[in-house]
Image (cartoon, grey):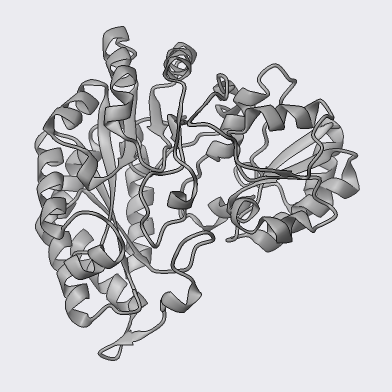
Amino acid sequence: MCPHTYKSDYAWPGMDLVAISGILSTEDLEYIDCLKENIRLQDLGPRLQAINPDFVFMLISSLSEKDDIAAVKAIKRATHATVSVLGDIATFDTARIAAMPEIDFVIRDYTNAIAIRKICKMEQQTKVIDFAVGNNFKIGIPRHELFQKYNYYHPYSLYDHATPVLASYGCPFKCKMCNSGSLKHRTRDADEVMRELAYIAQLGIKEIYFKDFTFLVKNNRNTLQFMIDRNLGLRVSCTTRIDTVDKDALELLKRAGCYLVFYGIESGSDAILQYMNKGFTAERAKETIALTKSLDIEVLTSFVIGFEQETAQDILDTTNLIFAADPDYLSLNILESRQGAELDKSCCEGGKTISGERMPDIRKRIERRFYFRPSKLLKYGCLFLKSPCRIKRSMRQLRSMITRVS
């Protein structure tokens, strides 16, 4: 149940639970996605009674906290299971969540394999599973087959039944609006990642998403070269930064099967970029997007409006960059506070006005201009034709987009 409730027409497995399936890979595991199965809260108890679990690991989110806590209580009423929770509020609002008597363990770091295994051995002494020590970690080989009964994909995926892979945890960068920079950056054992990729290909899965907060190509060159040398045939998407890639890095990604890169740019105003500690300029963003597209790698970009000190000129600069860089896909968001981020609620003025206009109106106008240009519609026609799965989903996504911006 958790934040997928608030996504339009797709769902994605939590990397937290995928990692747990690797850490506990020798146990008898079952995975349930309540949203994909349309399991209502009143039906959750009987479903779990039929399974009779000893332990339950469950995602909770600030976006859906009320429903998630209700689900925890339903689980405790229906079973004798030990309930462990993961998610943003477990990580960043730990004391409050740990005070809830229905919750047995609060997992702040889902890569802390030693402590998580202790839960199932009844050896864990403290209620809070804190961050693991060291700069490297192992989580075993996740049981990706558990998640294949659900058709997971991103809106831009080339194939159905895609799956996430983790190569690192946390982020070495400190952007003010993001909470991942408050998590110590650690890298996963490269040999373990390679074994997992080979296992995924063996299962017949055709697409992966490197679910790192920031996929650093230089740290994963051996992994990408392994994918090339073994000819795994996996199609890849990832999230990385404008200032961490160059032509060589992008060419390596392309050869390894990468078809899409997600860049979190956030603003077209150099003043806002500097304030957010982004570490690059709008011109650098434009150049990197152009380079990425020249290598036939699709580009998804994220932008944010609604910063406290943002002026009408700053929003115009963002709009100009969006249209000048012309990414394939645009995620335009209104700033909101995030658990663990440096910016608190006082800095998030999502409803404020600039020249008498509210942020949602500004966003809708930019999105309408971006998506409904004849050249962009023609481009989407070409992008949808890249795979049968995209053709199948294109009409549904088009309807969703029209509803959003109309």
Horizontal side of 123 relative to 398 (left or right) equals right
Quadrant position of the C terminus in the picture? bottom left
Horizontal side of 71 relative to 9 (left or right) equals right
What residue do we see at 30% from left, 71% from top?
363
* Residue 398 x/y as whole percent: 32, 53
Query: Residue pushed farthest top?
Result: 230
Q: How many labels does the image show?
A: 0
What residue do we see at 27% from left, 56% from top?
278
* Residue 29 x/y as whole percent: 71, 25
In the image, 396 versus 261, the foreground residue is 261
* Residue 384 x/y as whole percent: 25, 40
Horizontal side of 279 relative to 308 (left or right) equals left
What residue do we see at 42% from left, 57% from top?
178
Residue 121 quadrant: top right
* Residue 40 x/y as whole percent: 73, 52
Whether residue 367 is visible, yes or no, is: no
Q: Does residue 358 lie above or below 385 as drawn?
A: below
Q: Does residue 223 lie above or below 150 as drawn?
A: above
Q: Does residue 155 lie above or below 321 as drawn?
A: above
Query: Residue pushed farthest front?
Result: 134
Whether residue 296 is visible, yes or no, is: yes
What residue do we see at 79% from left, 28% from top?
120
Residue 146 quadrant: top right
In the image, 210 versus 176, the foreground residue is 176
Residue 381 quadrant: top left
